[in-house]
Amino acid sequence: MIYVWTGLALVGIAATLITFRSFRPAPLPAPAQWTDPLPTASPPADLAIYQLPTGTYENRALFAYRGGAFRDVRKFAATAVLVRHPAGDLLIDAGFGADVEAHIATLPSYRRTPHELGATIRDQLRSTNYDMTSLRGVIITHAHWDHVSGLAELDVPIWMNEAESRYVERAKDAAVFRDVASRREIHHYTFDGPPYLGFPGSHDVYGDGSVVIVEAGGHTDGSVVVFVSLPDGRRFAFIGDLTWQLEGVTLRAERPRMLQILADVRPARVRDSLLQIIALTDRMHVVPAHDIHAYDPIPRWTSSNRRHL
Ligand SMILES: [Zn+2]
C-alpha cells in the first residue's frame, strides 16, 4: 500500500512541477552574441560620464518584466547622465524636475505610485558651481514624463529626432513634455550616419565616435539608444525604456504583455531592439533608464568631480 501512496505522491509532485513550469513565461530566444569588432571610437582623454539621480518611483517587478514577483517592489530610477566632453557637455535625459509632483498628478491614478524626490539636475549642477555654459543640451531617450520632467529648469536645447517630434505632437503620454518643452529650443538631429551595432541609423554627436545615438523606435516613435565610449575602453549603452529593469536583458524577459500594450507604440520593434542589445551584453555595460543598479559603474556627480576638470 505504501508504494501506491508514494507513487501517487510522486505523480502529484511531478504534475505540480510541470504545471508550475508551464506557467513560467518563456524568455526571448537567445540571440548570437556580437563578435565583429565594435565601431571605432576615439574619445578625448578627458571625456567622462557621471550619474545624477533625481529620485525614484515604485513599481512591482510583476509589472516590470515577465516572471517578476508581485512582492518584489522595485525603486525605478529617475537618473540623468552627464557626459563631459571638451567640445561641450550633454545630458542624457533630465530626471525629475521641481514640478514633478504636478507632472505625476497628470498621470492616470494607477500609475501614480509612491516616490522619493531628490535634488533636481539644475540644483545638483548649481551646488557644484558647474559652468552652465558648458552644457550644450539634453539628449532625451524618449519624451515620457519620467525622462523629461527636469527639462523645465534646464535652459538648454532639447536634442530630439524627427520621429519623436511627431510623437510629441499627438501622444497622450507626451503631455508633460509639451508643457516643459514649450519654453525650450529644440535641436533636431538626423540619423545621418551608417548602421551601428545592428541598428539602422546613427548620429555621431561629436564626430569622434564617443557618443553615438541610434534609432530604436517602438516604445515611442523616436526612442533612441545612446552609446558612449570612454577613453579607458569601456562602453555603455543607455537604452532608455527598451526594458525597465536589467532582467529584461539578463533573463531576456520582456515587459508583460498587458504593459506592452499600454506602454509601447510598437512592441515588436521594442523586442527587436532589446534582442540587439542582448547580443551586445558581453561587450558593454547596458543601462536601462530605470534600473538603479545598472548605474553602479558610473560615478556620482559631486563637487569633487569638478576639481579634476
Ligand atoms: Zn521611463
Image (cartoon, helix red, strand yellow):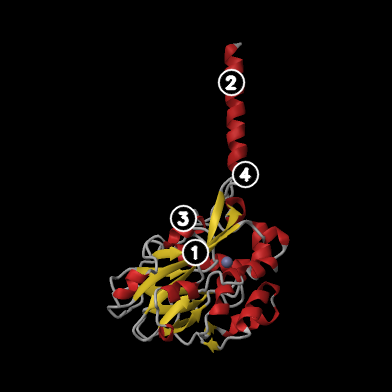
Which residue is labeled 3 in the image? Answer: 250
Please name the amino acid that badge 3 sits on: Thr
Which residue is labeled 4 in the image? Answer: 23
Kindly check if marks 3 and 1 are in contact, taking CB atoms under 8 A apart as contact: no
Please, what secondary structure does the residue beneath circle 1 have?
A: loop
Please, what secondary structure does the residue beneath circle 2 have?
A: helix
Q: Earlier in the sequence, mark 4 or mark 1?
A: 4
Residue shown at the point (44%, 80%) measured from the top left: 90
What's the CA distance linking mark 4 and mark 3? 20 Å
Q: Position of residue 280 (x, y in %)?
A: 41, 65
The image quadrant of residue 52 is: bottom left
Which residue is labeled 1 in the image? Answer: 288
Q: Residue furthest top?
A: 1
Disc 3 residue crowd, few under 14, some 14–19, many 20+, Cα 10 Å: few
Residue shown at the point (61%, 73%) measured from the top left: 220
| CB at disc 3 and ligand 1 closer than 8 Å | no
Which residue is labeled 2 in the image? Answer: 7
Q: Earlier in the sequence, mark 4 or mark 3?
A: 4
Q: Earlier in the sequence, mark 4 or mark 2?
A: 2
Q: Earlier in the sequence, mark 1 or mark 2?
A: 2
Q: Is residue 288 left or right of residue 183?
A: left
